[in-house]
Image (spheres, helix red, strand yellow):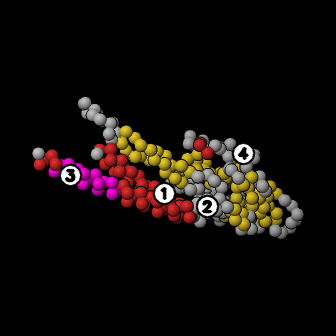
Amino acid sequence: MDRLIYTAMTGASQTLSRQAAVAHNLANVSTTGYRAEEHRLRAVQVKSNALPPGLSTRAFAVDASTHTDFTPGPQIFTGRAFDMAVQGTGWIAVQAPDGSEAYTRSGNFELNVNGILQTRSGLPVQGDGGPISIPPEVKVSVGIDGTVSTIPESGEKNTVNSIGRIKLVNPLEADLVRGEDGLFRMKDRSAAPIDEQTKIASGYIEGSNVNAAEQMVNMISLARQFEMQMKMLSTADANDRAAAQILSSR
């Protein structure tokens, strides 16, 4: 009886957490560079400090880890000079509000009033010498290796100036952790080294890697699983009442 109650109770609670994760994925099905997440559960034996300890009949279902799907999303052509998509594996480095370095695949960048290349949320894009500053009245092009070049729109229009290089990194996926802001960081909060093999495509953005149909199927499956767990709790309660009646009749 204990095993049934504890497993069903904690399983229902964690199923709600998994439903929340699936709902979050569905809400970001059109978010640029988004990576789907999945909650993985495991069973944990309940330990008692009572003496004697009793039988090992109770187990919890707990959230063991949050898995991130790092599969690249589809690349969408936009033609904008400040739109960039990482080809294959790798990340674009940005400066977080606390000054630390974070990583994103969302490459729909823009310029602020001071000419700093930044994300749509206002985070500066990291270059080889800090944030990249683009002068006014120039035409911008970004090379496959992240080099940002400008051509004056007036005067000598054939003069190409390199003003910086976007920092591209490719740390191990196991070393990355997703923050509450959706950005990824190194687990030890260090800065990942530049990776010369990581390339970007200018004029493209990377779409979300969420499969909407798969997530909807998961949502339906989790809803049925939750109903089954609640039914198990009702069955356990009915069995307990029946057992109590049998014992009281004696």
Disc nearest the viewer among 3 and 4 = 3
Name the residue type under label 1. Answer: Ala
* Up/down of 180 relative to 137, above or below: above
Name the residue type under label 4. Answer: Asp
Residue at (78% x, 61% y) in the render: 141
The residue beneath circle 2 is 208
Question: Residue 39 appears at what percent x and percent y?
Answer: 49, 51
Q: Secondary structure at mark 4?
A: loop
Query: How far apart in space, not on screen, are marks 2 and 1 (Cα)?
Result: 15 Å
| Residue span colored magenta | 230-245
Q: Secondary structure at mark 2?
A: loop
Name the residue type under label 3. Answer: Ala
Q: Are marks 3 and 1 in contact (CB under 8 Å)?
A: no
Q: Are marks 3 and 4 in contact (CB under 8 Å)?
A: no
Query: How far apart in space, not on screen, are marks 3 and 1 (Cα)?
Result: 38 Å
The residue beneath circle 1 is 21
205 lies left or right of 248: right
Identify the mark nearer the N-term, 3 or 1: 1
Residue at (70% x, 58% y) in the render: 85
